[in-house]
Image (tube, rainbow, N blue to C red):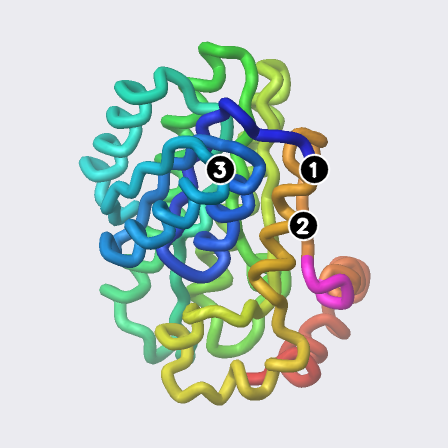
Amino acid sequence: MASLTGQTVLVTGASSGLGEQLALAVAAQGANVVLAARRQERLVRVADQCRILSGAQALAIQCDVSHVTEVDHVFATIDEVFGHLDLVINAAGFGYMAPAVEISAALTAKMFRVNTLGIMYISQLAAQRMIDQDYGEIVNVASIAGKIATPKSAVYAATKAALIAYDNALRLELKGHHINVMTVNPGPIKTDFFKTADPSGHYLAQVERLALNPVKLAEVVVSKLGHHRREINRPWFMAAANLGYQTAPKLGDWLAGSVFNFK
């Protein structure tokens, strides 16, 4: 795992879950960390932990990634305090499990603003700065759901599929500027994500044995930084299932609607 000492890293969705663990993991490698999320009190707590781990700076900035003005404030602060940005890790996002015919237009729009449009805007602002310095890395947390959609996840899967497609094009555009774009596609993770996505707790109970540990996943992500990795897909059997899905889509539909449908 390469040292990040002296580097400036922005982590969104850093107040809890995978985002929190990613922030702590990069701090443990000596990075100056800028943490962005909506819950300021929890964000401050994570920033305090980051300073202990890194011996460097950690800024906690309240930000809803779906609001352009708040994102602009985060980048203005980075420009003023550090003057450069080396790495962005976008872990902000949320889901809600419901049949496509029942989910409201307002919730659909909100999910796209947070999971897709907000991340795209942050990636754009980061890329503009990284092009000027001719190096950098953008890591966007999408989901295996963006590759294998299952019932009751139509909108969430669509937001992540769009993000994967965006990353695939952005990666090609930035390659000549020595900027890597890495997409992380996890399956279910043991985090508070499901308190919003499935308040009943049924889904997480069904997949608990298969769910990823956020600490271990964060370690894997950070270990791949600087290696021009295109994607990280976890767990391995879902990544393998995606390959099968592409070659045998009818079988894939059956599996997604039965074997992999825990909702």
Q: Residue at x 48, y 15 (%)?
A: 131
Residue 237, x across and y down, in percent: 77, 67
- Residue labelled with disc 3: 54
Which residues make up the magenta segment? 234-238
Q: Residue at x 21, y 39 (%)?
A: 70
* Residue 29 place in picture, x, y as percent: 57, 37
Q: Secondary structure at mark 1?
A: loop
Q: Which residue occupies the foreground of this view, 143 or 63?
A: 63
Label 1 vs 3, first from the N-terminus: 1
Residue 220: mark: 2
Badge number at residue 55: none
Q: Pointer 1: residues within 10 angstroms few (<14), some, or many (20+)? A: few
Q: CA distance from mark 2 to mark 1?
A: 9 Å
Considering the numbered disc 3 on the image, is that residue within a helix, a strand or a loop? helix
The answer to whether the residue labelled 2 contacts the one labelled 1, judged by CB atoms less than 8 Å apart, is no
| Mark 2 residue type | Val
Q: Is residue 236 magenta?
A: yes
Alpha-carbon distance for marks 1 and 3?
15 Å
Identify the element where label 2 is drawn: helix
Quarter of image, res 187: bottom right
Foreground disc of the pair 2, 1: 1
> Where 218 falls versus 229 (above or below)?
below
Q: Which residue is mark 1?
A: 1
Identify the amino acid type marked 3: Ser
At x 62%, y 21%, the residue is 175
Q: Distance from label 2 to label 3 (Cα)?
A: 19 Å
Whole-percent x, y for residue 238 in the image: 72, 66
